[in-house]
Image (cartoon, grey):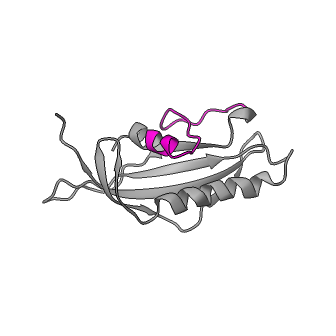
Amino acid sequence: MRSKEFIDYLTANGFNVYPDANYMPDLEESQLPALFVFGNGGSQSDPDLPIQFPSFQVIVKGENYKSDLTQMDKTEVIAKNLIRFLDNKIGYEIGRNHVYLSKSMQSNPIPIGVDTMGRPVFSTNFTFKIQPYKEA
């Protein structure tokens, strides 16, 4: 599964995701809160079946915490909603892949702190069990 396929899937399901994978630029405040997708490899494919196990880190960045003290909680809620959306989800499609199962690697988002602009940042991590479709 490509990172872009995952980004498109999250965007189609109502999440505000930065359109380029593996990159987290400083966005304007009006573009936040936003998710940033980073592919982090995953584990080896199944030796006998056409099944792969990709994994992704999704960073959730909120609006300025210093000007609105509720932003830390609001950003955490977005990260929790993402975990709830993907954890233990079975039998669906992402791009050109059948997803047998997606799992969150933790039950709560990991607080990273605030960036240099005072915006809260949380990390979430997911693993997938997929079967890519054969190209036509």
What is the magenta range?
8-28
For residue 66, side relative to residue 92 (left or right): right
Q: Position of residue 83 (x, y in %)?
A: 53, 60
Q: Position of residue 71 (x, y in %)?
A: 77, 51
For residue 133, side relative to residue 103 (left or right): left
Q: Position of residue 60 (x, y in %)?
A: 61, 48
Q: On the image, which quarter does residue 27 sit in? A: top right
Q: Residue at x 36, y 40 (%)?
A: 2
Q: Position of residue 53 (x, y in %)?
A: 31, 56
Q: Residue at x 18, y 41 (%)?
A: 134
Looking at the rendered image, the quarter that the C terminus falls into is top left
Looking at the rendered image, the quarter that the N terminus falls into is top left
Residue 24: in magenta span: yes
Q: Is residue 96 above or below residue 90?
A: above
Q: Looking at the magenta stretch, what is its main secondary structure?
A: loop
Q: Farthest bottom residue? A: 107
For residue 69, side relative to residue 93 (left or right): right
